[in-house]
Image (cartoon, grey):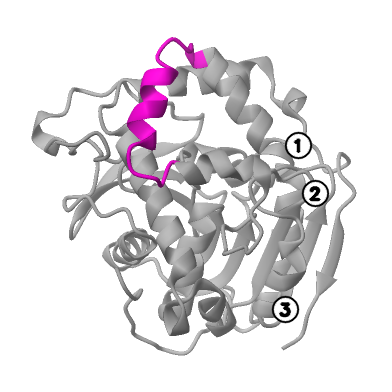
Amino acid sequence: MSSTELPSVPPTSVLPEPVAVRVAEGERLRSVRVPGATLTVRSRPPAREGLPPALFVHGLGGSSLNWSPLMALLDDAVDSEAVDLPGFGDSPPPDDGDYSITAHARAVIRCLETSGRGPVHLFGNSLGGAVVTRVAAVRPDLVRTLTLVSPALPELRVQRSAVPTGLLAVPGVAPLFTRLTREWTAEQRVRGVLHLCYGDPSRVSREGFRHAVQEMERRQRLPYFWDAMARSARGLVSAYMLGGQHGLWRQAERVLAPTLLVYGGRDQLVGFRMAQRAARAFRGSRLVTLPDAGHVAMMEYPETVASAFRELLRDATDPSDEGGTVQPDAQGDPGPSADIGGPTATTETTRG
């Protein structure tokens, strides 16, 4: 194997027994086998029966844990589940080693088809935002509403602070970075992630920081962690290069579901300037801008995001059907391979 190649992913059957992931109070984990992958799904029982289903999809390097704060706040509004994408969280690598946006979108679609819960209120953050945009474009029958928090959609001028993350896509960089940072402690890594992803890292509680360190220690024991990171970053960059009907912005224009867009003014990974372009691309969308938030507003200001979603849910719900809006039937393939008083939120609604 040359120095520019990524290490191969060992078969799932020979992977070491992973340390148990954290399960927040009131949550449950289960494994779901879909064609090509085994997915871990985190669920939170709803406050009452009959609530419409929701599915949450995390970003690069994240997991279903990223959605726990928001899921807890919405347990009286939706029946929540969050999925660990293949190779992330508690989900093992995909059978074929494919970490493209198309493959991740296909995994989400198969998860929804296997569970029979669709159509759902679909949420995505960062890379997960790109994934669910593709899902909503090609399978509108599976999506009631779409909520995107700092979605990773193509930018012509990438922010300087996002360059190191993008470099993971370059062959050889991931193993080089692993060697160069071998002496870094889990605490040092977590502090770096928090400063990159939060507008104000001090909003993370001591308990939250401790949990993040424990999760980082768990991930570092997984032999495929950096491989999944690098290949997913490469898949995202490849998706940025696609044109025509498979381009992410073109697919954003095809989304029929009512859409909520959430952007943070201090986001170091997704340019705040992209908020207006997204608002124009997603027809009939509403845009919430949080000047003090970073890249993970659903973790930093969960109450604000929950409040914005409740408004979307209220306006999108058909009074004759508590389950929500009804989307036209469609079939398709994804394409080629804190507190509400904290930020001052600005909301805009576009009509299209």
48 lies above or below 292: below
32 relative to 302 in the view: left or right: left
What is the crowding at mark 2: few (fewer than 14 residues within 10 Å), some, or many (at least 20)?
some
197 relative to 100 in the view: left or right: right
Residue 349 point in image, percent of width and height? 80, 75
Q: CA distance from mark 3 to mark 1?
A: 25 Å
Which residue: 65% across, 40% down? 161
Amino acid type at image mark 3: Arg
Tell me the element at label 2.
loop
296 lies above or below 157: above
Find the magenta span and give its range.
168-186
For residue 332, what is the image quadrant?
Answer: bottom left
Residue 64 point in image, percent of width and height? 46, 42
Which residue is denoted by mark 3 in the rendering? Answer: 280
Quadrant (top left/top right/bottom left/bottom right) for the N terminus: top left
286 lies above or below 35: below
- Asked whether residue 181 is drawn in magenta, I would say yes
Residue 242 point in image, percent of width and height? 44, 73
The mark nearer the N terminus, 3 or 1, is 1
Which residue: 49% across, 37% down? 65
Amino acid type at image mark 2: Gly
74 lies above or below 62: below
The mark nearer the N terminus, 3 or 2, is 2
Tell me the element at label 3.
helix
Dot 2 and dot 1 residues touching (CB under 8 Å): yes
Which residue is denoted by mark 1 in the rendering? Answer: 199
Q: Which mark is residue 265?
A: 2
